């Protein structure tokens, strides 16, 4: 069928070829493993290439297909952010502190992908414990942006976004706590979705901020995202916050129709300091939706300005507690001199095992929860969170989906913001509110700047209405071709990231 | 139950915090067994080991057990209870935090009726909340490192907090006994302080009698028996009196009871000064109580010890002391009532239970902490035995022999009596023959008796009983001997 290289395909194209018997899962696995081998030196999207696993998964998928089995992800090469526990495969979370840790269990999303017959190609790089916006906080070196290897891939799921963009897999999973799927999707010119909090199980996903963390997919098209989301979504009794609500047929919801839909544009999301090309591309995308028959309404989300401050109290508070288990006692790194006492072991292990940003957030969170500060910080942040949530409820009384930029700028240069945590935190200013409100949101490419760097459009839907955002995004992609662009072969162009 | 000690012008003010391990099959947040005594770390999984990415899932049974306790102690169940994380580092705490409840507990405002020498007193309960237990650090296996056993990590606990309503060390122990009886009746906790399935910390302060202000309190930990609780609190009260009377001031601190030295010692401040940074656990939903379910739990509550004791006195006419012994354990009270149903002689059945039955249970260790696992004889069999005494088939003395046979070989008391020929001889002719034979065989003794040596009467009784194999009706033997010897 397609004359394109398989590593440039979408899931839909690959599935068509597999179903036509023109290719096999094993062929695909080899093609993507080869591609990974050639681009990894420049991109460093992966922390581990699971070659043997990929080949055995692929053979299993071919055998299942031979028996007549079909499925949206049967034989499809995928990558997992290295925050997902994978049985028998090292899981680092981008941190030295998990050195040597091999989980004896799979995350729920991993089990679901396996049952669906997906082929695991590798585990991807991330900011340590998902704390960051550029993947530069990985203990194992940053991931470069496939469109320009001198720039960041975004974070924290930078490896998963870059792996899709660079053709190392057809889909990947990430997690999004404050924008960690949408920001790298936007920077890398791919599609990414953060589903509603509770839609995908967090079981086996290493926790950063439990009330905000959510699993979601990356892929080249919105239609592909719908396929992956359909596989990973659903109630899991092992996660008490996973919601026992039926999962709609997302693929079936993509009917290309936006006529009559009301699309809200929040005025607070076009912030001072936004790159003009970003604003122009997003406004143009909104105009395109209008031309497709949608009604555009301006709405207000007045508490948006408190979102970053709120997030940086809630998330570190939860993180300070979630990361207490890395104490050198049961797994991972243990540092202790021969004469060390218990306290020494804790100090040395955590000092050597955690990077600067993780330590910063543990300190922030510990402080916010401390006696005498709890009310002023943590409790107040929870109240602000309620206000932010209420903002969205009011906005969704006036519209069906919100359309905004994903980030104020395109991908920035490697090292540009590492010395300025606050500037880094502001990369997430347009994505964080969605996590605080627990809503689903989609990021998809809607243009490129003059330097050829991708710009992302964010579509936010009401809780458990993922299909609303997916329908709009898919309709947009039927009418545009931004998602068909592929980055130049990384490594062939500019030099490596390091 | 104990005499109130004399603290002079000082009145102790005591509140207790009791941790009760719940008797659920599995742990509070995972499916691992909650049983005591397995090989180290045999009852563990990624969840209770605190591995990365795993999540807690609440054990519904534990909520039911805690709710039963709350209802049995007259607590109110607020609409919402919330799980909170209590953060601190310790190797036996795998996650670095304990999942507990903080400002929104499961139950509030209850009370326990406590029997004291001055009568029944109500000790109010502040709250009952649920939490997970920690594991255990093992320090004595090696010189240079410690080991961690996580079998206990995640075992469900209830923390039952009393108001400072207790006024003496003895009353504290009485409160604990009453509370333990309730927990055992509800089958929610086995109440074994030595094994640690029931643990107790005490908040102790003193004030001048007649005043109402609360003094500075100390918290006493490490009391591993009812006796320890009573001694430690008494010692601490006396220490505080001495400090205050010597012009000193009580420092608010945690003190550890040292049973060997009979003293309390302050815990190092580094260990005591924790900021636990409680906050709601984002991995768990709040517990929202369903009034219909709470009612269902309430309807399923058994009769509690105090009510049962009163009923035994009232309906069965046994003395309050006997009723208290029989109702201290639910299974003993059940046994009593089962025997009574077969033969309505409460006093005699009660005597058998309090004497021979419970003695054998103790001697042969037929119980675990909560239930008697094997009764020496079945309640129906005991009832039959008592019936045989009551209808004159056997004497009380022979009954002891029959009882021993029943314990040794089992079997029905009536068949034992028949098989062994133990039926009481009431046939005057047969007894008379035996009496005549004894008198004829001992002319010297008869002469001595007749000359005034009354004490020899017992000798004749013994001889007759021996001749009849103990089966002669004692009254008939006495009557006949008296008349014949007088002759």
Image (spheres, grey):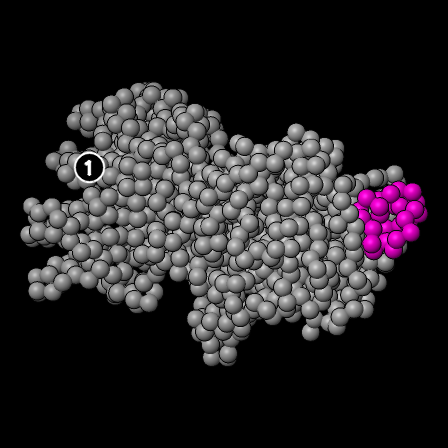
The C terminus of chain A: image quadrant = bottom right
Residue sitting at 27 percent across and 48 percent down? B16
In the image, is residue A23 part of the stretch drawn in magenta? yes
Instruction: Judge whether residue B291 is colored magenta.
Output: no
Residue A147 in view, yes or no: yes
The residue that disc 1 covers is B121
Which is more toward the observer, B359 or B300? B300
Up/down of B137 relative to A481, above or below: below
Identify the residue at image location x=79%, y=56%: A486
Q: Position of residue A57 (x, y in %)?
A: 80, 52
Badge 1, how many Cα within 10 Å: few under 14, some, many 20+? some
Of residue B135 and residue B288, the one placed in the foreground of this image is B288
Residue A178 % position (x, y): 55, 52
Q: Residue at x 8, y 47 (%)?
A: B211
Residue at image point 22% right, 24% down: B479
Tell me which chain the residue with mark 1 is part of: B
- Span of residues in magenta: A1-26
Describe residue B320's horizontal placement relative to residue A306 as left or right. left
Q: Nearer the viewer, residue A409 or B441?
A: A409
């Amino acid at each position: 069928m397609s004359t394109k290289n398989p590593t440039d395909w979408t899931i839909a194209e690959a599935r068509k070829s597999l179903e036509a018997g023109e290719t096999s899962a094993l062929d695909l696995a080899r093609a993507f493993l080869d591609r990974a081998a050639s681009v990894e030196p420049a991109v460093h999207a992966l922390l581990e290439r699971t070659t043997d696993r990929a080949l055995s998964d692929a053979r299993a998928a071919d055998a299942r297909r031979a028996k007549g089995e079909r499925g949206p992800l049967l034989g499809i090469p995928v990558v997992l952010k290295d925050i997902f526990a994978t049985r028998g495969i090292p899981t680092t979370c981008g941190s030295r502190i998990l050195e040597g840790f091999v989980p004896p269990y799979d995350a729920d999303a991993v089990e679901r992908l396996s049952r669906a017959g997906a082929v695991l190609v590798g585990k991807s790089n991330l900011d340590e414990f998902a704390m960051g916006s550029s993947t530069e906080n990985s203990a194992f070196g940053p991931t470069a942006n496939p469109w320009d290897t001198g720039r960041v891939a975004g974070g924290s799921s930078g490896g998963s976004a870059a792996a899709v963009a660079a053709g190392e897999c057809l889909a990947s999973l990430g997690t999004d706590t404050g924008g960690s799927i949408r920001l790298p999707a936007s920077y890398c010119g791919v599609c990414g979705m953060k589903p509603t909090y509770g839609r995908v199980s967090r079981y086996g996903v290493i926790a950063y901020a439990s009330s905000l963390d959510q699993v979601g997919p990356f892929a080249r098209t919105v239609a592909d995202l719908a396929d992956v989301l359909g596989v990973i979504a659903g109630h899991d009794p092992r996660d008490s916050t996973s919601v026992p609500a039926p999962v709609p047929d997302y693929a079936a919801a993509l009917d290309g129709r936006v006529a009559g839909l009301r699309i809200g544009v929040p005025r607070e999301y076009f912030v001072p300091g936004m790159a003009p090309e970003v604003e122009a591309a997003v406004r143009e995308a909104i105009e395109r939706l209008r031309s497709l028959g949608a009604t555009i309404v301006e709405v207000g989300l007045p508490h948006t300005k408190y979102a970053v401050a709120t997030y940086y109290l809630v998330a570190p508070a939860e993180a300070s507690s979630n990361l207490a288990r890395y104490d050198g006692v049961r797994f991972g790194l243990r540092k202790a001199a021969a004469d060390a006492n218990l306290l020494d072991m804790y100090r040395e292990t955590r000092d050597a095992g955690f990077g600067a940003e993780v330590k910063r957030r543990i300190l922030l969170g510990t402080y916010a929860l401390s006696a005498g500060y709890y009310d002023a910080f943590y409790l107040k942040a929870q109240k602000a969170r309620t206000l932010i949530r209420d903002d969205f409820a009011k906005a969704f009384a006036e519209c069906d989906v919100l359309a905004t930029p994903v980030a104020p700028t395109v991908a920035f240069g490697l090292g540009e913001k590492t010395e300025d945590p606050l500037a880094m935190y502001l990369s997430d200013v347009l994505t964080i509110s969605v996590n605080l409100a627990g809503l689903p949101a989609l990021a998809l490419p809607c243009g490129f700047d003059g330097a050829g760097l991708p710009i992302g459009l964010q579509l936010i839907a009401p809780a458990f209405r993922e299909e609303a955002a997916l329908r709009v995004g898919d309709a947009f992609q039927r009418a545009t071709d931004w998602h068909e662009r592929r980055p130049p072969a990384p490594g062939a162009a500019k030099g490596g990231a390091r | 139950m104990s005499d109130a000690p004399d603290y002079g012008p000082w009145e102790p003010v005591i509140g207790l915090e009791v941790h009760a391990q719940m008797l659920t099959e599995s742990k509070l947040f995972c499916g691992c067994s909650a049983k005591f005594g397995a090989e180290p770390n045999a009852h563990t999984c990624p969840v209770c080991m605190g591995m990365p990415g795993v999540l807690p899932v609440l054990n519904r049974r534990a909520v039911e057990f805690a709710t039963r306790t709350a209802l049995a102690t007259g607590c109110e169940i607020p609409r919402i209870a919330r799980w909170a994380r209590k953060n601190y580092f310790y190797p036996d705490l795998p996650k670095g935090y304990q999942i507990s409840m903080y400002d929104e507990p499961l139950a509030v405002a209850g009370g326990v009726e406590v029997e004291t020498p001055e009568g029944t007193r109500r000790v109010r309960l502040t709250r009952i909340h649920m939490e997970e237990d920690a594991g255990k650090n093992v320090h004595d296996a090696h010189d240079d490192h410690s080991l961690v056993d996580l079998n206990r990590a995640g075992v469900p606990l209830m923390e039952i907090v009393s108001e400072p309503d207790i006024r003496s060390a003895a009353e504290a122990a009485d409160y604990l006994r009453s509370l333990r009886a309730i927990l055992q009746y509800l089958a929610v906790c086995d109440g074994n302080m030595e094994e640690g399935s029931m643990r107790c910390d005490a908040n102790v302060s003193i004030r001048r009698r007649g005043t109402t202000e609360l003094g500075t309190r100390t918290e006493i930990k490490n009391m591993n028996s009812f006796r320890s609780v009573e001694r430690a609190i008494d010692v601490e009260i006396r220490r505080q009196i001495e400090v205050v009377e010597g012009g000193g001031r009580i420092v608010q601190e945690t003190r550890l009871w040292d049973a060997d030295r009979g003293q309390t010692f302050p815990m190092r401040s580094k260990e005591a000064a924790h900021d636990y940074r409680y906050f709601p656990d984002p991995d768990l939903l709040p517990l929202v109580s369903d009034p219909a379910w709470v009612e269902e739990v309430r309807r399923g509550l058994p009769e509690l010890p105090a009510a049962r004791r009163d009923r035994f006195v009232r309906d069965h006419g046994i003395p309050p002391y006997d009723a208290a012994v029989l109702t201290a354990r639910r299974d003993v009270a059940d046994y009593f009532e089962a025997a009574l149903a077969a033969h309505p002689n409460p006093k005699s059945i009660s005597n058998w239970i309090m004497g021979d039955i419970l003695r054998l249970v103790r001697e042969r260790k037929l119980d675990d902490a909560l239930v008697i696992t094997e009764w020496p004889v079945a309640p129906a069999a005991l009832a039959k035995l008592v019936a045989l005494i009551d209808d004159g088939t056997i004497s009380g003395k022979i009954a002891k022999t029959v009882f021993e046979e029943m314990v040794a070989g089992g079997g029905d008391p009536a068949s034992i009596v028949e098989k062994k020929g133990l039926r009481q001889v009431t046939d005057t002719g047969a007894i008379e023959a035996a009496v005549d034979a004894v008198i004829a065989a001992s002319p010297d003794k008869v002469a001595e008796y007749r000359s005034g040596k009354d004490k020899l009467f017992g000798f004749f009784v013994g001889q007759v009983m021996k001749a009849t194999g103990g089966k002669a009706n004692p009254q008939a033997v006495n009557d006949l001997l008296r008349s014949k010897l007088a002759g």
